[in-house]
Image (cartoon, rainbow, N blue to C red):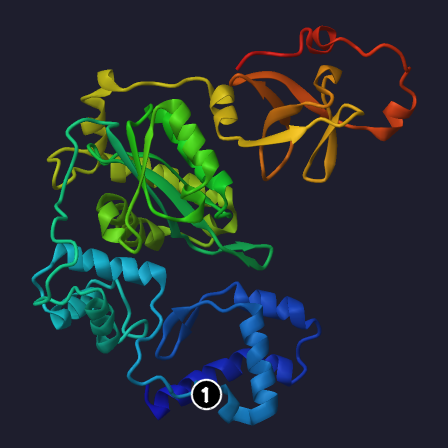
Amino acid sequence: MTDNDREQIALFRFSLISPILNKQVKKQNEYLAKVAAKKHNVPYYGVREYSPKTISMWVRAYRKGGFEGLKPKPRNDRGKSRVLTPELKEVILEAREDHPDRSVSLLYDQLITEKKMLPSQASYSTVYRFLKKKNLLVNSPRKEENRRRFAYDQVNMLWQGDEMYGPYLNLDGKKVKTFLFAFIDDCSRVITYAKFLATEKFSAVQQVLSEAILRRGIPKLLYVDNGKVYRSDNLHFACASLGITLIHTKPYSPADKGKIERFYLTVRKRFLPLLTDDDLSSLDKLNKSFFKWLEKDYHRKVHSSLKMTPLDKYMSQISQVKTYDDPEKLKLLFLKRAQRKVRHDGTISVNSKLYQVPPVYIGKKVKIRFDQETYDNIYLYENGKCITKAEPVIMADNAHAKRGNPISFAKMTEGGSKNV
């Protein structure tokens, strides 16, 4: 970055904060939110978005150091590799996997030419040091020499799953981050299900995987990375209950899941550029556009390695698909499992709330399952079967309850319990 670049960037920053400095803005927070919701063509960096916090920081920098305070500081980490985002690392590793014999300079130029990466995101030396650290230079021995391209010849034999950062939504002047969770069938390249969500929690994996199973059947193998949500006991229990073998990639090996990474690259190249401001005005509109593109574009384009469309390949083996058509039962498989001891008043505590259970379990330990994010329903299990649902304790009702012989468990569960 030259001195001229720094001056141009400072001028751009000043143009955004000058209404605040000149007291043209009555409500600063509203102005910051409005500016942050827009995309800006920034000198040197290209199209960028900034948070209200960042813009406020520029105001403080100007008041403290004047125009000079708005200039980017020169790098003081020469000789060290810049921090590459996880997304950019995946792009570089995927490019190296596809072209193991290319020199780093040629690989870098190709990434820039194909607009998979901007020069401002990483210099040639940064990419070189990153690949060198991974032992992936063209003349370097590969650490994973036994890695081979593979593809199963049967649908639903293996699904690959992962997530990618999606576009920001503009909701009432506020920016909301999105994440695209997806599962792809290794054989047909069909996206068994994918959806943009505003959370990275386990509930996102549960929602997308459940929908994939209900729509496309049960896979035999599920191949995911080592992220916390994929290491969850909930996922392990659910897969075991469905007869799915859960497999995790080796740490820092995104190339192992080449097919899902390739799909995400397709999303970035063929779907994200099509989005309008209206598409980004709500999560529902974003997903509606995505589902339409997925079914009319991705699934119906001939895949180079298949010589047919992913949908045609999947449908050619539809008779081999093991289906699952019980949404409620599937939902229960993903619940958090725990154990509680029933107190003398016939209650258990979950997330600092009391729940009433049949008095027959007083003093005993019971196995329970619940949604660990909402805690809406607490179920009691015995021998792997749901025997009843624990109800929240309402102190006012208990104060007026008649005291006498304990209600029998049979009467409490009569008509209300159901084996699942």
Q: Return the x and y of residue 216 as percentages of the image width and height.
A: 33, 25
Q: Does the image show residue 207? A: no
Q: Position of residue 404 (x, y in %)?
A: 89, 11
Residue 264, placed above or below residue 207: below
**Rendering quarter of residue 110:** bottom left
Q: Quadrant of residue 396?
A: top right
**Residue 239: percent from left, percent from top:** 39, 29
Q: Residue at x 49, y 93 (%)?
A: 68
Q: Is residue 152 left or right of residue 292?
A: left
Q: Which element is circle 1 on? A: loop
Nearer-the-camera pick, 74 or 33 = 74
- The kind of residue tagged 1 is Lys
Name the residue nearer the viewer: 108 or 276: 108
- Residue in view at x 49 percent, y 65 percent: 38
Residue 77 in the image, given as x and y percentages of width and height: 35, 84
Question: What residue would you read off at disc 1?
Answer: 71
- Is 204 left or right of 258, judged from the image as shown? right
The local crowd at label 1, few if under 14, some if 14 to 19, many if 20 or more residues have their Cα within 10 Å, is many
